[in-house]
Image (tube, rainbow, N blue to C red):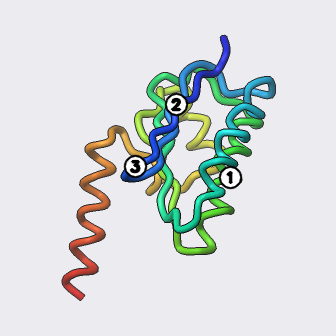
Amino acid sequence: MPLTITVKESPVPTLTLVGRLDTDTAPQLDAALSKVLERKGIKRLVFELSGLDYLSSAGIRCFVRARKALEPGGGTVAIVNPQPGVRKVLDIVKAIPAKGIFASVAELDDYLDAIQQQVREQ
């Protein structure tokens, strides 16, 4: 199965992946990711994985690349809605910290709201 990538630019860049992320399709994600990461000032990036059926080590490298690009500047990468098999792979290899994986976009929004509230209270 091929990989379909949809990029939503605002308010937070979100890459929605559908299909298989493997050796054959990872270059496609790398190309889309490069275009997103070229933009200045990106602090957050979301991968929406509800339609991702398979994840290989080549796909994991794409997520790690995004983290390496954003985290030195204080940015974060979040993964939302991973399928159970994909979630298991992410948990095993720890490519994304557990605090960066969310069951839904609403859960991610609640987390971000709580962080912003903490900052305002300081």
**What amino acid type is highlighted by mark number 3?**
Ser
CA–CA distance between discs 2 and 3?
13 Å
- Provide the residue designation for mark 2: 6
Residue found at the far top of this picture: 1
Q: Which residue is drawn at 72% across and 41% down?
A: 30
Front residue of 20 and 44:
44
Q: Please tell me in which quadrant of the rendered image residue 70 appears.
A: bottom right
**What amino acid type is highlighted by mark number 2?**
Thr
Q: Earlier in the sequence, mark 2 or mark 1?
A: 2
Q: Quadrant of the C terminus?
A: bottom left
- Provide the residue designation for mark 1: 64
- Is residue 28 left or right of 89 when viewed as pictured? right
- Nearer the observer: mark 2 or 1; the answer is 2
- Is residue 42 left or right of 61 when viewed as pictured? left
Q: Dot 3, how many residues are within 10 Å of its Cα: few (below 14), some (14-19), or many (20+)? A: few
- The x, y position of residue 86, in whole percent, is 56, 30
- The x, y position of residue 66, in whole percent, is 64, 54
Front residue of 62 and 29:
29
Q: Quadrant of the N terminus?
A: top right
**Cβ–Cβ under 8 Å for marks 2 and 3:** no
- Provide the residue designation for mark 3: 10
Q: Dot 1, how many residues are within 10 Å of its Cα: few (below 14), some (14-19), or many (20+)? A: some
- The x, y position of residue 47, in whole percent, is 51, 41
